[in-house]
Image: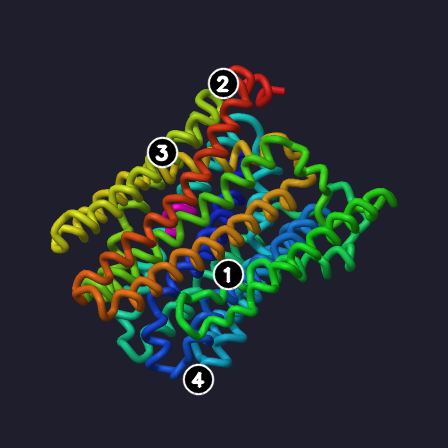
């Protein structure tokens, strides 16, 4: 087997792992009504089943990225897949909500261990224009996984039945996980010949990092818009501010001793990384919550099944996949203009959907949303693949896994904040208008206001992208940097 063939096989194993990991962030959303019926799960337990995966995923990302850069990515791939697949099996057999909840938290840890290794492996295997192509295909796969998740979850419930269909959402990970473990063993390069650094886990940095991330994500992850939300949770943002200051101080001090900190602060002095991180965080604060709003609305507002509601997003997945591939092949000639163009398209379809929910006949909305999502997928594909490539363009290969994990963490934090904002507005609207507006109109108002909120987040991402574009200069500068 040629080196080129082996490289691309390793790539597709890694990208497949990323796809399976991302699928579990969206396909479980469609199972919440079934879990409430089958296991008697409370609203709090349901929230943790969804949000807990995102939280533990985020917590594991940066330490796993650092260890992967310093040691064997192959070993961490295997550890992450074994944990992820094992916990998926336990989740599928869960007889009560508590067991499912614990399995879901540990499943997130496994996902967080393996995800940074994907981006780090791409950094190691590809350079220059070929890296743009690789990240374009990566973006296409992530786009497909994000948008197909709800439909896949709805299909599992439809095939398995209303009582046990949710179990198949987790059981499908077992054959996929075993195949991916075999793929890692056969095709992922080992660490043999890799310069061996002194393993630096920075335990105090990890503790401060965990405290800071939990304090930031917790109040947003547990915001549902219902009266049961505890207002005291917002005090955790004070803990976040203190923890962040302490983390920055400690990491600076730790680096001055000559040891490798958990997160080298020098990463944030790289303009491309810093701007790409902000764009990605804000973009993922707006896009996944849009899918969640649409899925909930189609079921509650229009009475659709979980399967049909999930399939509404299929058009976005298909057009996003093509656009990601197309952009990946052209990133080194068009540059950051791809991100700005894509963001304008996504923002436009969000505004159009909000307008349609306000002014057009209700019966037209499913077809209009499906069509707009197909158009929006073109913009989404441009954003994801181009931003992923440009974000890492100035990052050294030895820090690729860590930088990628920080970017992924930003996306998870953005997702948590955006979901909290969108759901709070959606459910608050349902509650506020319950007695003052005709019942058939209330879900449409909730969808419109929720879409406006996530559109504002995308607008902020667009502003950052425009500022970054103006600071980059012309595409020739990008080409010269890529060829160095």
Q: Position of residue 95 (x, y in %)?
A: 44, 84
- Which numbered disc flags the more N-terminal residue, 2 or 4? 4
* Distance CA(mark 3)–CA(mark 1): 27 Å
Q: Position of residue 251 (x, y in %)?
A: 77, 48
Q: Position of residue 186 (x, y in %)?
A: 56, 51
The disc label shown at residue 220, or none? 1
Q: Which residue does the image show at 39% across and 56% down from the upper left?
A: 422
- Please tell me whether residue 295 belongs to the stretch shown in magenta: no
Magenta: main secondary structure equals helix
Where is the C terminus found, in terms of image quarters?
A: top right
Give the farthest residue toward the right. Answer: 257
- Which numbered disc flags the more N-terminal residue, 2 or 1? 1
The disc label shown at residue 344, or none? 3
* Distance CA(mark 2)–CA(mark 1): 39 Å
- Give the residue at mark 4: 95
Label pair 2/4, CB-CB below 8 angstroms: no
| Depth check, front residue: 302 or 14 | 302
- Give the residue at mark 2: 475
Q: Is residue 273 left or right of residue 50?
A: right
Part of the protein shown in magenta: 141-146
Q: Which residue does the image show at 44% across and 52% down from the upper left?
A: 19
Residue 452 seen in render: yes
Q: Nearer the viewer, mark 3 or mark 2?
A: 3
* Distance CA(mark 3)–CA(mark 2): 20 Å
Secondary structure type for disc 1 = helix
Q: Nearer the viewer, mark 3 or mark 1?
A: 1
Label pair 3/1, CB-CB below 8 angstroms: no
- Which numbered disc flags the more N-terminal residue, 3 or 2? 3
Secondary structure type for disc 4 = loop
- Which numbered disc flags the more N-terminal residue, 1 or 4? 4
* Distance CA(mark 1)–CA(mark 4): 29 Å
């Amino acid at each position: 087997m040629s080196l080129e063939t082996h490289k691309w096989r390793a790539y597709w194993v890694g990208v497949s792992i990323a796809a399976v990991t991302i699928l579990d962030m969206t396909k479980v959303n469609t199972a919440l009504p079934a879990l409430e019926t089958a296991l008697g799960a409370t609203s709090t337990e349901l929230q943790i089943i969804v949000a807990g995966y995102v939280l533990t995923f985020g917590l594991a990302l940066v330490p796993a990225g650092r260890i992967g850069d310093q040691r064997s990515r192959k070993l961490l791939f295997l550890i992450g897949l074994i944990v992820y697949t094992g916990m998926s099996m336990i989740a599928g057999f869960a007889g009560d909500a508590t067991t499912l909840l614990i399995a879901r938290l540990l499943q997130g840890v496994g996902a967080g261990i393996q995800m940074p290794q994907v981006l780090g492996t791409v950094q190691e295997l590809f350079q220059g224009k070929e890296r743009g192509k690789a990240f374009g295909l990566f973006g296409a796969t992530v786009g497909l996984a994000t948008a197909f998740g709800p439909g896949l979850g709805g299909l599992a419930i439809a095939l398995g039945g209303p009582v046990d269909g949710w179990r198949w959402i987790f059981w499908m990970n077992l054959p996929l996980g075993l195949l991916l473990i075999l793929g890692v063993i056969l095709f992922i390069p080992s660490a043999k010949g890799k310069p061996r650094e002194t393993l630096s886990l920075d335990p105090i940095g990890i503790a401060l990092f965990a405290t800071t991330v939990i304090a930031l994500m917790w109040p947003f992850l547990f915001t549902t818009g219902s009266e049961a939300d505890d207002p005291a949770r917002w005090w955790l943002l004070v803990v976040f501010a203190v923890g962040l200051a302490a983390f920055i101080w400690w990491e600076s001090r730790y680096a001055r001793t000559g040891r490798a900190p958990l997160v080298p602060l020098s990463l944030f002095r790289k303009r491309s990384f810093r701007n790409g991180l902000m764009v990605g965080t804000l973009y993922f604060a707006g896009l996944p919550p849009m899918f969640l709003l649409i899925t909930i609305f189609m079921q509650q507002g229009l009475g659709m099944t979980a399967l049909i509601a999930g399939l509404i997003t299929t058009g976005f997945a298909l057009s996003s996949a093509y656009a990601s591939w197309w952009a990946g092949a052209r990133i080194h000639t068009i540059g950051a203009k791809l991100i700005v163009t894509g963001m304008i398209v996504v923002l436009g379809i969000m505004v159009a959907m909000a307008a349609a929910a306000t002014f057009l006949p209700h019966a037209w909305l499913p077809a209009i949303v499906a069509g707009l999502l197909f158009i929006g997928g073109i913009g989404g594909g441009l954003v994801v693949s181009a931003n992923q490539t440009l974000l890492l363009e100035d990052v050294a290969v030895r820090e690729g896994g860590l930088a990628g994990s920080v970017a992924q963490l930003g996306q998870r934090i953005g997702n948590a904040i955006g979901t909290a904002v969108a759901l709070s507005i959606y459910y608050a609207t349902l509650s506020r208008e319950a007695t003052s507006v005709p019942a058939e109109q209330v879900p449409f108002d909730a969808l419109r206001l929720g879409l406006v909120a996530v559109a504002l987040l995308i607008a902020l991402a667009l502003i950052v992208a425009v500022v970054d574009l103006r600071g980059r200069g012309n595409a020739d500068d990008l080409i010269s940097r890529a060829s160095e």
